[in-house]
Image: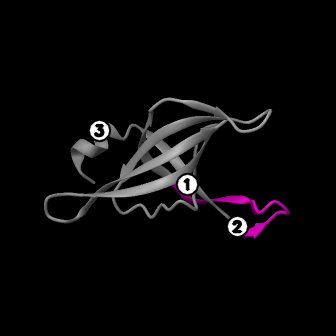
Amino acid sequence: MDALLLDLLTQTITFQIRSSIGEDDRGNPTGDWVDDIVDVPCRVEWLGGTERRAAREVTDKSHRIFVDGGVAITEAHRGVLGSRIFEITWVGIRYDEFGAEHHRTIRCEEVR
């Protein structure tokens, strides 16, 4: 891991994935969330915005999470940082000048 990048990744996050995938009667995915990749150094940035999805569910829109390159995260994962849960909406890979993967940028929404 790049030393400068390590200095920026001051938090740790766990990425979870569904243990089995099915659908409920409304087409939403079902299954329990289980830890997949744990204690990943990261940096979480809030970019702004909120949205009410249902009477009790509010999301903080537009968070960005940075992790080291090579961490196999996809949109099927969710991030857990303490009691905070992040639904991943996009994962981008950033490369260094030699074409090696440097870090991943993850766009997500925090569910409260």
Q: Which residues are magenta?
A: 19-38
Looking at the rendered structure, the secondary structure element under dot 3 is: helix
Viewed as shown, does residue 53 lie left or right of 72?
right
Q: Which residue is mark 1?
A: 15
Image quadrant in which the C terminus is located: top right
User: What percent of the width, then of the height, locates residue 15?
Assistant: 55, 54
Q: Which residue is mark 3?
A: 7
Tell me, yes or no, whether the highlighted magenta stretch contains residue 27. yes
Q: Which residue is mark 2?
A: 19
The foreground one among 34 and 107 is 107
Tell me the CA gap for discs 2 and 3: 33 Å
Looking at the rendered structure, the secondary structure element under dot 2 is: loop
Tell me, yes or no, whether the highlighted magenta stretch contains residue 28. yes
User: What percent of the width, then of the height, locates residue 22?
Assistant: 76, 69
Looking at the rendered structure, the secondary structure element under dot 1 is: strand
Q: Is the residue 84 above or below the residue 99 in the image? A: above
Residue at image point 50% right, 62% down = 74
User: Pointers 1 and 2 in contact (CB under 8 A)?
Assistant: no
Residue sticking out furthest to the right: 25
